[in-house]
Amino acid sequence: MTTAIIGTGVIGSVIARHLAAGGETLRLSNADIEPARALAAQIGPAAFVAASNRDASQGADAVVLALRFTALKGVIGEITGPLTGKIVIVPSNPLTADAHGHVSRVLPEGQSSGTVVAGWLPAGARLAMAFGSMSADLFESASNRSPELAVLFYVTDDDRAGEEAARLIRTAGFEPVRAGGIEQSGRLEVGGDLHDLVVGAAEARSLISPV
Ligand SMILES: NC(=O)c1ccc[n+]([C@@H]2O[C@H](COP(=O)([O-])OP(=O)(O)OC[C@H]3O[C@@H](n4cnc5c(N)ncnc54)[C@H](OP(=O)(O)O)[C@@H]3O)[C@@H](O)[C@H]2O)c1
């Protein structure tokens, strides 16, 4: 299967390496093409550098938008056509940093980032919020944990997007656990109760549905 990764920065690069290690074919694009080229050279023949974001998404089974939250709306607007009917996976946390590195949330407290992203997507796009629930270092090191795989949580309102997110999470070396619908995306974000957890499936399920 083929996945497009738009944005080959910190988290996009780790997602790409994990997916390629699991056998996925990748179509990469980035604002500056050089980091995408360097990543593709590191990964090998499984990674193809696309000429543009639109080119990356065309022909892919799923599109991962590994972009800062503030860049998402513009890129979605640029590739509306190819995203129609497509499975779209978004790891973005709704954060921004000022010139001093102070990080703040770009959405009002209580507003779900997933619901906002869903509103930017064209009708028919199938959204899952996934791959953003761990910091990049943790995500890099927790893949293919032994003896029990670590869980990666995802949220979606769409069963097909959920199946694809779960497949990609397994391909990346994690056990997928759905934490609910898109409105639950805040639980996966920085500051959410499911963020940066490295747990097995049983503990993950108890956290989703406490008894
Ligand atoms: N880093 C983490 O530990 C981590 C963990 C979980 C979730 N996340 C979330 O993942 C998202 C990305 O974070 P990051 O740390 O990976 O950020 P990043 O390192 O800045 O990567 C973002 C990438 O997007 C590219 N980009 C920007 N505008 C673009 C456009 N119009 N078309 C194509 N590519 C474009 C940038 O390219 P240029 O550099 O060429 O502009 C950059 O390579 C954020 O929302 C963050 O909250 C990050």
Image (cartoon, rainbow, N blue to C red):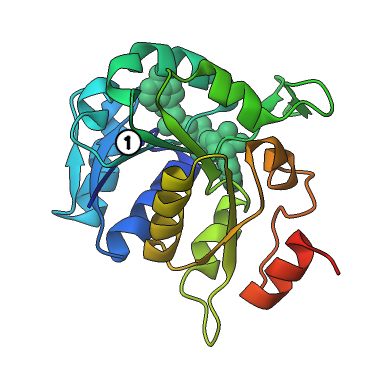
Q: Is residue 150 left or right of residue 18?
A: right
Among all residues in the image, which is located at the extreme bottom? Answer: 147
Instruction: Please give the name of the residue rendered at 39% of the width and 51% of the height, measured from the top-left corner.
Output: 164
Give the quadrant of residue 83.
top left
From the top left corner, tell me how far across and down residue 16 is, in percent: 35, 50
Q: Position of residue 195 (x, y in %)?
A: 71, 52
Q: Nearer the viewer, residue 35 or 70?
A: 70
Dot 1 alpha-carbon crowd within 10 angstroms: few under 14, some 14 to 19, many 20 or more: some
The residue at the far front in this view is: 159
* Residue at 20% across, 25% down: 55
Where residue 153 sits, quadrant-wise, is bottom right
Q: How many marks on residues? A: 1
Mark 1 lies on a secondary structure that is helix
Residue 23 placement, left or right of 69:
left
Q: Position of residue 105 (x, y in %)?
A: 76, 27
User: Which residue is drawn at the image coordinates 35% and 16% (left, top)?
Assistant: 80
The one of 142 and 192 positioned closer to us in this rendering = 192
50 lies above or below 168: above
- Which residue lies at the image location 47% right of the left edge and 46% below the top edge? 159
Drawn side of residue 200 relative to residue 187, left or right: left
In this view, 197 is above or below 165: below
- Horizontal and vertical percent for residue 40? 23, 46
> Does mark 1's beta carbon lie closer than 8 Å to ligand 1?
yes
Is residue 200 visible in the rendered structure shown here? Answer: no
Q: Is residue 143 visible?
A: yes
Q: Amino acid at mark 1?
A: Pro
**In this image, 23 relative to 89: left or right?**
left
Q: Quadrant of residue 204?
A: bottom right
Q: Is residue 31 above or below residue 133?
A: above
Residue position for label 1: 35
Identify the image quadrant of the C terminus.
Answer: bottom right
